[in-house]
Image: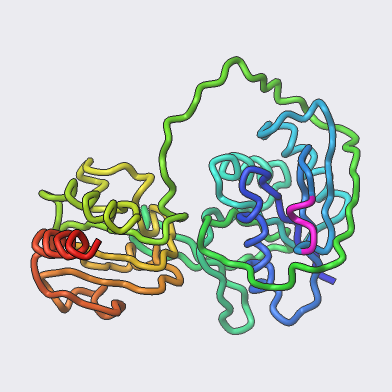
């Protein structure tokens, strides 16, 4: 039986649960087992989704200590020979995954966005050259197949009522990363575009008026996002960029203002319920994906829609 080890990030456990969909696509109809591993956190939120959960409780392992966690996961791999290891591509996951791959002397496909099969060969898809192309990578070695998975791309809708077996694990040897909290600072309140039901997104066609998008987003109880062109111009933070080199989003409504919709941007849209495109060019690539296409000026569209909302509110 194939076995897949998944790192459970206790800050956002759903990210790790969604990696079960990656395991399903990797193994298909083959029989396989999913094993989650967490460190010094409660396994209750993960119960029912994984076949087994390895719970590592050790007072000397600090939260987000990549040195110690790498050693423990390497120890688990050496003992159990998992066929695959999946890690969510969170900020910490992007530190942990390459460190673990080096420790195990195996390859790593980072920031995976899709899984496909070609002629019975598994192909792992990820953005390359700053998101300009999508690279298909085939694992040629015996494994383990190791990947970090981009957040928000996969969505697990399978069985969440399994009789999960809890395994309490005491690590034999690990290195203390000597990470200590020196001080804490309250983080400035920000938003994550992946959690928004409504996104008002701007592209190259609204470079001169990008700041007006917030007015419409506020009226719709949504958030502002941007294409890479806007970010490269320094008009928006990369935290709100949609696309291969940004974030993958799944809102109920996506309003694309002045966005051409090249492959790099479209790859950041997954399971969007409704897309409205506003563009002076009705033949722009994103228009073919849209439920409604408005041919015209984006600023005029914003003004008219805001007026209409205010009239009816």
Image-based side of 193 in relation to 311, left or right: right
Question: How far across and down, in percent of the image, does residue 173 sit?
Answer: 87, 32
Q: Is residue 239 above or below residue 136?
A: above
Q: Nearer the viewer, residue 159 or 1?
A: 159
168 in relation to 24, above or below: above
Relative horizontal placement of residue 211, taking residue 35 as reference (left or right): left
Q: Name the magenta segment's main secondary structure.
A: helix
Q: Is residue 257 above or below residue 174?
A: below
> Is 145 or 222 nearer to us in this picture?
222
User: Which quadrant would residue 312 be assigned to in this image?
Assistant: bottom left
Taking the spot 10% from the left edge, 49% from the top edge, the residue there is 208
Residue 241 rendering spot, x and y as whole percentages: 34, 51
Taking the spot 64% from the left edge, 74% from the top edge, the residue there is 25
Q: Nearer the viewer, residue 228 or 127?
A: 228
Q: Is residue 265 left or right of residue 172?
A: left
Answer with the quarter of the image where residue 289 lies. Answer: bottom left
Q: Is residue 158 magenta?
A: no
**Residue 36 image-quadrant placement:** bottom right
Q: Quadrant of the C terminus?
A: bottom left
The residue most toward the bottom is 119
User: Is the N terminus in the top left, top right, bottom left or bottom right quadrant?
Assistant: bottom right
Q: Is residue 258 visible?
A: no
Q: From this viewpoint, is residue 312 visible?
A: yes
**In terms of depth relative to the viewer, which is nearer, 246 or 193?**
193
x 63%, y 62%: residue: 18
Q: Which residues are magenta?
A: 44-48
Counting every numbered tag in the picture gives 0
Q: Does the magenta portion include 47?
A: yes
Percent position (x, y) of residue 190?
Answer: 41, 39
């Amino acid at each position: 039986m194939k076995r897949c080890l998944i790192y459970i990030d206790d800050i956002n456990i759903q990210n790790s649960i969604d990696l079960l969909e990656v395991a399903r696509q990797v193994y298909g109809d083959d029989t396989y087992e999913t094993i989650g591993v967490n460190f010094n956190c409660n396994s209750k939120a993960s119960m029912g989704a994984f076949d087994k959960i390895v719970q590592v409780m050790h007072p000397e392992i600090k939260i987000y200590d990549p040195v110690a966690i790498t050693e423990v996961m390497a120890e688990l791999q050496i003992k159990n020979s998992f066929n695959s290891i999946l890690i969510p591509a969170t900020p910490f996951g992007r530190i942990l995954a390459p460190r673990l791959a080096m420790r195990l002397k195996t390859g790593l496909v980072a920031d995976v966005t899709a899984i496909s099969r070609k002629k019975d060969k598994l192909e792992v898809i990820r953005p390359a050259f700053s998101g300009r192309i999508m690279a298909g990578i085939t694992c040629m070695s015996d494994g383990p197949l190791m990947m970090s998975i981009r957040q928000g791309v996969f969505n697990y809708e399978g069985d969440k009522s399994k009789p999960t077996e809890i395994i309490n694990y005491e690590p034999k040897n690990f290195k203390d990363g000597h990470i200590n909290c020196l001080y804490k600072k309250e983080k400035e309140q920000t938003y994550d575009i992946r959690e928004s039901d409504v996104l008002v997104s701007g592209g190259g066609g609204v470079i001169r008026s990008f700041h007006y998008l917030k007015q419409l987003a506020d009226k719709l109880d949504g958030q502002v996002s941007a294409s890479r062109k806007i970010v490269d111009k320094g008009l928006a933070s990369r935290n709100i960029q949609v696309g291969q080199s940004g974030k993958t989003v799944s809102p109920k409504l996506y309003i694309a203002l002045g966005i051409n919709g090249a492959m790099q941007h479209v790859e950041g849209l997954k399971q969007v319920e409704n897309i409205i495109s506003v563009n002076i060019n009705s033949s722009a690539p994103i228009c073919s994906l849209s439920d409604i296409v408005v041919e015209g000026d984006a600023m005029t569209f914003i003004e008219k829609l805001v007026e209409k909302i205010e009239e009816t509110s």
